[in-house]
Amino acid sequence: MEVRVRYAPSPTGLQHIGGIRTALFNYFFARANGGKFILRVEDTDRERYSDESLEDLYSTLDWLGIKWDEGPVVGGPYGPYIQSERFDLYKKYAEELVEKGRAYYCFCTPERLEEVRKAQAASKSEYQGYDRHCAHLSDSEIKEYLRQGIKPVIRFRVPTEGKTTFHDIIMGDITRRNRDISPDPILLKSDGFPTYHLANVVDDHLMHITHIMRAQEWIPSGPLHVLLYEAFGWDVPQYCHLPMVMGKDGQKLSKRHGSTAVRDFRQKGYLPEAILNYVTLVGWSLDGNTEFFSKEQLEKCFTMEGIHKSPAVFDYKKLDWFNGQYIRQCDNDRLASLIAPYLEEAGFVSSPLTDNDKALIARIVPPVKERMKVLSDVVPLTSFLFRDVPVVDKSVYVAKGSDEEKTGEALKKASAILLSGLKEGKDEEVIETELAALASEFEIKVNGVFQPIRVAITNSTVSLPLFDSIRLLGLDETEKRLKRAISLFEE
Ligand code: GLU
Ligand code: ZN
């Protein structure tokens, strides 16, 4: 049997880390088993639907290099793959269940339902939900309602007795008493729109989905879906509910923890291969050891057995670390084209780039490559080359363990050593040793000497390695800035 899995997002918001993890697990599982990965757009909730989120879905998968075998745009044998284009079909299936006696028409007005709800709340009755008022209408009653032009919804008849069990590959058997399943959920709304449950089950069946890998928050829907499959007389696919994605504090990952939208990560300058690698490790491992995986490797080695049972933690720091590693592995030409938009956006270079800009960026790449965690770091790291905003707060020049007086003195002497050394063409290491010796003369740490010159030259405490900065800035400009800082301390 061919493995067929699907990612079935609702385009009601931006793709977030948890969603994309579901997509990746499905995609890798399909690839590793020589199966098919299907993309299905579940856009039955027209109120929460937005074009922007649909575009975001496509562009995010595209950015990650995830290609679907069947789905919107590419088509496939069981299309269309956008639920709003399949509405007629759901109606037919809902009516089939009515014929079988497993579903029924309900003509209750919203007002009546609201009264029922209020009465239930007031009486604190154990029984909450639809009161099955229309569960046993006679044919003539139904005809009469229809004659009056009242449009019914179709409700699923949930058995009141017995239990329903579904098997989950990760969680094992999950059993629920049927009377605990929300009574008689709507399958088809009065405007002919299907609800999530109907559309989801019908499509998974018609699209021959073999494994349903989705977030754990869908477990409560499991028993109802199983009852639907049985009512239709269809085989139940295999379920595999994925562990929750948590923040470090053990709470469900949310905006409180930081960005969760993949688009935000992309804008900050995370590389797709880093996101893909790290996100796949959130709740999955091959051997508990290996951390670096390329997409191609995961396409071969992903297994369902490697999915963890316990909740997974999304660690932003760890992702930063991964991203840094991938940046350092990145080819220089590619990195140049990746950082260019950030420099354009900051107004440091022109857009489109001139030949001079291109040459400068090529020189910037090697030093920034060693320092960036995210691509947008290139802006603070290189702004000293494009904007000269001197630091006038003396305390910024003072390193830990030093003081203002020593800093001023050290700056003066260090500048002399540095400038003459550079002009004489001394080895950088030699100059560094001389600067370090100066520190012991002042009885301060090495940074007590390096920090003031770094701040003087780059107008910042976080910057590129000293000699790289000087090379990029040029000797004349370096000298000018050092002198300016010296005079600041002489004021
Ligand atoms: N449309 C649902 C969602 O947005 C799909 C749930 C499922 O995979 O069954 O998560
Ligand atoms: Zn009713």
Image (cartoon, rainbow, N blue to C red):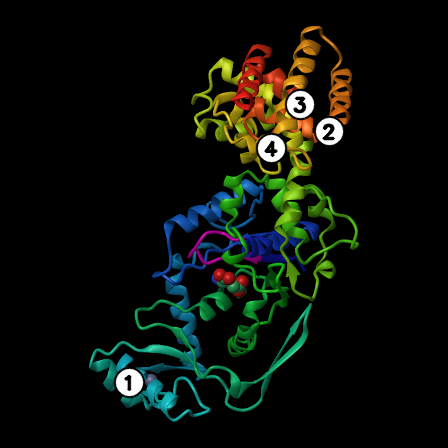
Q: Nearer the viewer, mark 2 or mark 1?
A: 2
Amino acid type indicated by mark 1: Arg
> Residues under labels 3 and 2: Cα distance?
11 Å
Q: Left or right: 490 with respect to 423?
A: left
Q: What crowding class fits label 4: few (fewer than 14 Cα within 10 Å), some (14-19), or many (20 or more)?
A: few
Amino acid type indicated by mark 4: Val
> Residues under labels 3 and 1: Cα distance?
83 Å
Q: Nearer the viewer, mark 3 or mark 2?
A: 3
Q: Are marks 1 and 4 in contact (CB under 8 Å)?
A: no
Q: Nearer the viewer, mark 3 or mark 1?
A: 3
| Residue bearing mark 2 | 446
Q: Are marks 2 and 4 in contact (CB under 8 Å)?
A: no
| Residue bearing mark 3 | 410
Q: What crowding class fits label 1: few (fewer than 14 Cα within 10 Å), some (14-19), or many (20 or more)?
A: few
- Whichever of labels 3 and 4 marks the residue nearer the N terminus, that label is 3
- Whichever of labels 3 and 1 marks the residue nearer the N terminus, that label is 1
Residue 148: quarter of image? bottom left
The spot of residue 449 in percent (x, y) is 68, 26
The spot of residue 26 in percent (x, y) is 61, 55
Amino acid type indicated by mark 2: Val
| Residue bearing mark 1 | 112
| Residue bearing mark 4 | 462
Q: Left or right: 418 with respect to 379?
A: right
- Whichever of labels 1 and 4 marks the residue nearer the N terminus, that label is 1
